[in-house]
Amino acid sequence: MFANAAQRGLFDRMAIGLSGLCLVHCVASAIFVALLASAGGMLLDPRIHETGLVFAIGLGIAALGRGIVHHGFMMPAAVGGLGLGVMAGSLSLPEGGAGTVYTIVGVLILALGHDLNRRAVA
């Protein structure tokens, strides 16, 4: 059976197919890693974080401020403001490590403030 397959060139065709798959894998992997490196550099740009914080502050003022006017409770705005402050403070820390942890904590606190605001009833 193996001799017959070898005579028909089956093993060579399989080897050529495997080589082609290897080539596709190597080229696709190199392109994928290059794209990730480019996107990673862009996503770690401080301007992205600063712009995001500006939008978060603007939306926080609008939503949490509306909540104070609508239901009269200050607690959601205070909690949300604390979250925004932690997020703003995290921009002064180095990227990665503590800066990332403080950003995540700030985002969670801000989300809690928005949830409290959403649940408050006049």
Image: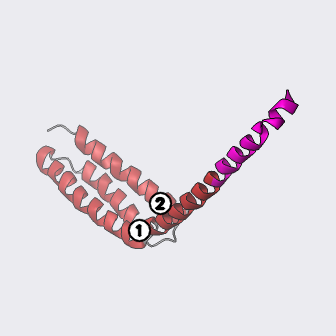
Give the magenta-colored segment's residue range.
Answer: 1-23
The image position of residue 71, as x and y in percent, is 15, 44
Occupied quadrant, residue 34: bottom right
Instruction: Give the spatial CA distance, label 1 vs label 2.
Output: 8 Å
Picture disc at residue 98: none
Colour scheme of the picture? secondary structure
The image position of residue 108, as x and y in percent, is 40, 50
Q: Which residue lies furthest to the top in this view?
A: 1
Q: Which residue lies furthest to the left in this view?
A: 69
82, 99: nearer the viewer: 99
The image position of residue 20, as x and y in percent, is 66, 50
Task: Name the kind of residue labelled 2 in the image.
Answer: Tyr
Occupied quadrant, residue 47: bottom left
- Taking the image as shown, residue 25 lies to the left or right of residue 3, namely left
- Taking the image as shown, residue 4 lies to the left or right of residue 20, namely right
- Taking the image as shown, residue 29 lies to the left or right of residue 39, namely right
Whether the magenta-drawn stretch holds residue 10 is answered as: yes
Callout 1 secondary element: helix
Picture disc at residue 89: 1
Callout 2 secondary element: helix
Q: Are marks 1 and 2 in contact (CB under 8 Å)?
A: yes
Which residue in the structure is indicated by mark 2?
102
Whichever of callouts 1 and 2 sits on the residue coming sooner in the sequence is 1
